Amino acid sequence: MALFGRKYDDELDNNYVPLEEFAPTISRQEVVKRKKLSDLISPIRDIPTALRGRRDQIESDLSSFSSDQDESFDELEEMLSDIVDDTKGHIDDVATLNETIEKVREALSSIKETTDNLPELPDNSELSDEIEIPQINLPKLSAEYMPDSELVAQIRSYSSFSHILKKSVEYTLSSLDQYHKQVQSLSKKKEMLEALASEADLLALNTTIDATHMNEESRAFSTKVAAEVGDLSRKIHDISAALDAELGALENGFRTVRSSVNTIESAHRDASRYADMYSSASNEYYRQSTNYTNILIQSLSRLNQDFRETLDKQDAIQADYLKALEVFRSDIMTSAREILYKGSRIGSVLDGCIRGSASLKEEMTETLENIDELKSLLSDVRKTDAIRKSKYSSALLKAFDQDIVWLHNKIESVMEAAENES
């Protein structure tokens, strides 16, 4: 983080000194004396042309690399924005899910209050006068207390969200690998520049060797020319070292961004684990609620049928009626106790669901904060890289242009003077 957190004003100035400040001055008289060396140094004229071609190639590569890097940053920022929007939507879904569970809990409380207020067994005299057969609306009861099937479908949708998040992270890693390959390509261009410097060194060496076969004055001139070519070689080596330092900074930036993406992958694994736990608990709740509803409907249907049969026999056998009515009350109490037992178990499952959804919401909120922090970090990285690329590329190309122009003018002036004197 420290690499991208510093201010770009602290970077080196990178004002390269032109080569003419290091080169010796040759008088016109010395040029006249050494005019016979024109055939020896004529190949040096090709050096500025070769360096200018190499300079154009480096400028093109730097421009292409900068464009591809900006495009990768744009795609990464757009992908992170999509992940943030999806995460916010799922946080709202968790809040809605909590509200649904609270409504189910209120329905269970209503069932408990109903069982606590069961009617007492009527007097025999009241039953002899008038008996009303109760009507149980089973479809309404089932529709009111059956769990909502959309609840489980909503929970299962989190698995699809985890898959989308994983694919997004894989695409981000692929973009970063492409960025790393571009850096390696730029390193190869640096090696080509070093090869050119080696060729300049070899030319200086050959000039020095040729000087050993000349007279004293010609040897001195050839030695100075070799020294100038050697200075050019050292200057190329210095430029190569600056380019190597820039490549190292780009490599460090790549590793920092890749570490941030690994943090997203860790958050994705945690979110998937909590979503699986929450889905399992909700499925268990749905299964138990379904069993409870089926038992309730079956019990009430059987009791309703028994009660109707007892009422049909009331005129014939009063005692049988009272006995059947007592059985009815006993069965009602048994069913009520069973309802309370099932309700307590469902309440426990609901408590677990609420805790799980709250925990999942906190984890997803934390993930959202991490993604926002990553977006801010990527923005700082992009700003710092843009400033660094502009500053170093301009300084490098400017120094290269100055050196090429000076070397070309220097060689042409010497050769022109030698040709005029001849």
Image (spheres, helix red, strand yellow):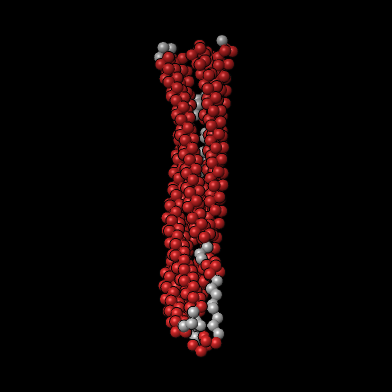
Q: Nearer the viewer, residue 275 or 129?
A: 129
Q: Against 407, is 369 above or below?
A: below
Quarter of image, res 418 = top right
In the rendered image, the residue lying farthest to the top is 422
Residue 281 relative to residue 380: left or right: left
In the rendered image, the residue lying farthest to the bottom is 125
Q: Against 339, is 178 above or below?
A: above
Q: Residue 86 in the image: x percent, y percent?
A: 54, 53
**Going 46% across and 68% down the picture, which residue do you hit?**
298
**Going 52% across and 85% down the picture, which residue do you hit?**
127
The answer to whether residue 113 of the structure is visible from this angle is no
Q: Quadrant of the C terminus?
A: top right
Q: Nearer the viewer, residue 225 or 125?
A: 125
Q: Nearer the viewer, residue 25 or 84?
A: 84
**Going 53% across and 32% down the picture, which residue do you hit?**
61
Q: Residue 389 in the image: x percent, y percent?
A: 54, 39
